[in-house]
Image (cartoon, rainbow, N blue to C red):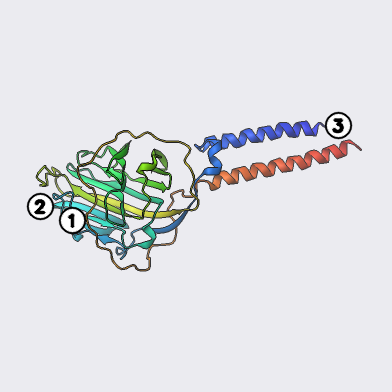
Amino acid sequence: MHFGAPRRFGAALAVLVVLAASALVGLGLPASAAAASQQWQLVAQDQFNGALAPHWSVYQGSPACCRGTTWATSQVAERDGRLVLTATRKNGQWIAGGLSAAGWPAMVRTYGKYVARVRVDRGAGISAVALLWPKSNVWPPEIDYYELSAQDADRTQETQTVHRAVDDAQLRSVYQGDLTQWHTVSVEWLPNSISYFVDNKLTGRVTDPAYIPHQPMWPAFQMQIQQNAAGQAIAAATGSVSMYVDWFAVYAPVTATTPTTATTPTTTTTPTASTAPATATTPAPATSTAPVAAPPTGANSGSFLWIVLAVLLLLALGWLLIARLLRRRSRH
């Protein structure tokens, strides 16, 4: 009696290949991208539980770009397990909060993944941004991976912008949603691409090599006040407006890969002013007090793909062994 095992094995193997491809497509990646998925390793984080870590440099004074903004250390605090930056009017003058990780060596990197859980209050005339700034303090370049405009009082969209080093030409993508609610925003900066994500969904990608920085940069969070042509603050918000950061994490690339697709920027503009401070105080490096557990950011996105492929391969090999045993039995 002959069981036709080899034929059934061939058919089963074809089914397994189809299942593997379907699994990859279901994960939102083409099969050709599976082997090229980027791996990341957590190198630093802050969950903002307790006093502000000494690595952070809190801004004081006005940036060269925006004289209508006055930063004060009183406007930065850790409260209820979150970093809170606040813009408020005191004695007829607007003051705001901002800080950088210029003094945190693990966060000052050339290439990396920066992830934050953030939200911002409504408020006319108040902007908020999460950005990367050059360690050299020579601007540009600059990467703004989460920026809410002062003109968007209801917080209905955020922009992601890279400023080209040589002339400050910009490539920008836009995400629309309710930014008064919590979102996880991130940027993946590699030697050949910059990719932006909101809640783990790709919202923009830059692959033009002329726009990609290749120098150390540090992360910052800051709020700014809308100003007129004379540099005077003209924010129309009433009361205080805050930016909240639940946690922040930085990853180093394990391997650098080439992106499979490119996103065309929605606009290309030339700015009139910088969005980061002209100077920043760098405190002496200290030992990190951040917890060691990684936030749930899905950093190792390629691991699940490899597990699926490994399981399917083992199933195929098991079927091959069974088929051979059946062939031997049919000969007796």
Q: Mark 3: which secondary structure?
A: loop
- Dot 2 crowding, Cα within 10 Å, few <14, some 14–19, many 20+: few
**Are the residues flagged by discs 1 and 3 in contact, CB closer than 8 Å?**
no
Q: Residue furthest front?
A: 166
Residue 90 visible in the snapshot: yes
Residue 46 in view of the camera = no
Residue 199 x %, y %: 39, 43
Q: Tell me where residue 26 appears, x and y as whole percent.
A: 53, 35
Q: Amino acid at mark 3?
A: His
Q: Quadrant of the N terminus?
A: top right
**Secondary structure beneath disc 1?**
loop
Which amino acid lies under the numbered mark 2 shown in the image of this protein?
Gln
Quadrant in the picture for the C terminus: top right
Label 1 is placed on what type of residue? Trp
Residue under the image location 16 percent in, 51 percent down: 69
Reading the image, the residue beneath label 1 is 71
Seen in the picture, residue 49 relative to 192 is either above or below; the reply is below
Q: Give the residue pinned by disc 3.
A: 2
Direction from residue 54 to residue 254 in the image, left or right: right
Using residue 69 as the reference point, say whether residue 184 is left or right of it.
right
The residue where tag 2 is placed is: 93
Query: Label 3 crowding class (10 Å Cα cut-off): few <14, some 14-19, many 20+?
Result: few
Q: Say which label, 2 or 3, has the lower sequence index.
A: 3
Spatial distance from mark 2 to mark 3, Cα to Cα?
91 Å
Q: Label 1: few (<14), some or many (≥20) within 10 Å? A: many
Q: Height in image: 10 above or below 200?
A: above
The CA span between labels 1 and 2 is: 11 Å
Q: Quadrant location of residue 196?
A: top left
